[in-house]
């Protein structure tokens, strides 16, 4: 769980992160593009999440093509959701129980702010 995002639920915040890769999703009759961001931090440098998947929106598209290691700054809304297995298979329910987690939604004001070496783990803080 991303507990550092918990206190920000329902608020729009400015964040920095490192772009890692593009992805896609399919479900409920629709599909879309996503991106994986790592080392998500607030403007004071506090680590909020080691990674998060976020929808690839027009803001990311306008910022241009991203490559692994591109540093990005953006605003997003923090939202809570329930994750886990909702099906009827008991073994899967035990392996992935329901839990509250936090995600980033509606990214805006996206801008590239530099690059970091993706092979080097950032210093915390």
Image (cartoon, grey):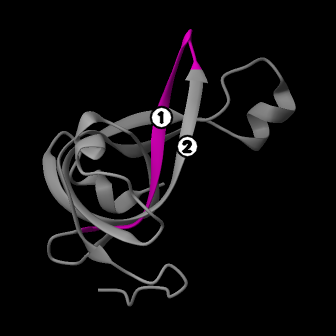
Q: Indicate which disc, 2 or 1, sits on the residue closer to the N terminus.
A: 2
Magenta extent: 27-41
The secondary structure that dominates the magenta segment is strand
Please state the horizontal and vertical placement of residue 118, each as a whole percent of the image: 50, 78
Residue at (19, 39) in percent of width and height: 10
**Considering depth in this image, is 5 or 13 the residue closer to the camera?**
13
State the image coordinates of residue 13 (x, y, percent, origin top left).
Answer: 15, 53
Q: Secondary structure at mark 2?
A: strand
Q: Quote the CA–CA distance across marks 2 and 1.
A: 6 Å
Other-residue count near label 2 (Cα within 10 Å), few / some / many at <14 / 14–19 / ≥20: some
Question: Does the magenta portion include 28?
Answer: yes
Residue 81, relative to residue 109: is it above or below? above
User: Could you say which quadrant of the image residue 17 lies in?
Assistant: bottom left
8 over 47 or under it: above or below: above
Q: Residue at x 29, y 86 (%)?
A: 125
Q: Which residue extends farthest front?
A: 64
Q: Is residue 87 visible?
A: yes
Residue 101 vs residue 27, the one in the foreground: 27
Query: Is the residue 111 above or below the residue 46 in the image?
Result: above
- Residue under label 1, please give it: 33
Residue identified by numbered label 2: 23
Q: Are marks 2 and 1 in contact (CB under 8 Å)?
A: yes
Instruction: Name the residue: 37% across, 53% down.
Output: 65
| Residue 87 within the magenta-colored segment of the rendering | no
């Amino acid at each position: 769980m991303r507990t550092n995002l918990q206190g920000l639920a329902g608020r729009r915040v400015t964040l920095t992160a490192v772009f890692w890769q593009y992805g896609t999703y399919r479900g409920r009759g629709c599909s879309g593009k996503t991106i994986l961001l790592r080392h998500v931090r607030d403007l004071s440098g506090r680590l909020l999440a080691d990674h998060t998947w976020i929808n690839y929106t027009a803001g990311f598209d306008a910022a241009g093509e991203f490559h692994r290691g591109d540093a990005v700054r953006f605003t997003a809304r923090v939202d809570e959701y329930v994750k886990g297995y909702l099906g009827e298979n008991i073994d899967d329910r035990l392996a992935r129980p329901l839990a509250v987690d936090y995600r980033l939604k509606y990214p805006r004001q996206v801008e590239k702010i530099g690059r970091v070496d993706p092979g080097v783990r950032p210093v915390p803080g």
